[in-house]
Amino acid sequence: MQNIRQICLEGAQWLDQHDLEMWTFHKDGGHRWDIATTNSSESINNVYRECRALPISAIVEMTFWKTNRWFVNRLHWCEKREAQGKVHSDYVTKIMEKDNRKSSRHTVTVMNRNAGEYSVETGH
């Protein structure tokens, strides 16, 4: 907060008036943490687990076919969901419905439409 105070005292005073869990990751109980981070090295290790001792050309080929298979499988899954009239996965739909309920308590004021500046007041 000290850094914020040095840059913008008004902003720091505004933040002081609002609960930490409303504007910080470290006090939100882990609710937003899952969507904000990715362990890239863990993901890559998982992809290449089967081919660590192979020559680079074999690793490149395996990567191509694995990626291709993933996209084809994903396409079939999406086509099935679309035929059922579903746009998003059940997991995403559930999150969006919850977020819509929460956002209904917010008030948005247009500050400068051309610059894309808005003020959002969070309701409790």
Image: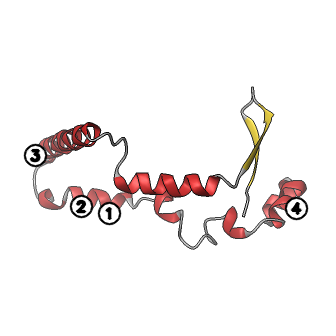
Closer to us: 22 or 99: 99
Q: Which residue position holds label 2?
A: 46
For the residues marked 3 and 4, what is the alpha-carbon distance in whole angstroms? 58 Å
Q: Secondary structure at mark 4?
A: helix
Query: Along the horizontal axis of the image, is 56 left or right of 25?
Result: left
For the residues marked 3 and 1, what is the alpha-carbon distance in whole angstroms? 21 Å
Compared with residue 85, is residue 16 higher up or lower down, i.e. above or below?
below
For the residues marked 1 and 2, what is the alpha-carbon distance in whole angstroms? 6 Å
Check whether the beta carbons of the residues at disc 2 and disc 4 lie within 8 A of each other: no
Q: Secondary structure at mark 1?
A: helix
The picture places residue 96, in percent across and down from the top left corner, at: 49, 52
Q: Quadrant of the C terminus?
A: bottom right
For label 2, the crowd category at 10 Å Cα-Cα, with few meaning under 14, some 14 to 19 and many 20 or more, is: few
Q: Secondary structure at mark 2?
A: helix
The dot on residue 42 is 1
Query: Looking at the picture, which amino acid does disc 4 mark?
Result: Gln
Please state which of the two labelled residues, at mark 2 or mark 3, is closer to the viewer: 2
Q: Which residue position holds label 3?
A: 58
Q: Which residue position holds label 4?
A: 13
Please state which of the two labelled residues, at mark 3 or mark 4, is closer to the viewer: 4
Compared with residue 100, is residue 27 higher up or lower down, i.e. above or below?
below
Query: Looking at the picture, which amino acid does disc 1 mark?
Result: Glu
The picture places residue 100, in percent across and down from the top left corner, at: 57, 52
The picture places residue 72, in percent across and down from the top left corner, at: 17, 39
Query: Looking at the picture, which amino acid does disc 2 mark?
Result: Asn
For label 3, the crowd category at 10 Å Cα-Cα, with few meaning under 14, some 14 to 19 and many 20 or more, is: few
First-in-chain label (4 vs 1): 4
Please state which of the two labelled residues, at mark 3 or mark 1, is closer to the viewer: 1
Q: Residue furthest top?
A: 114
For the residues marked 2 and 3, what is the alpha-carbon distance in whole angstroms? 17 Å
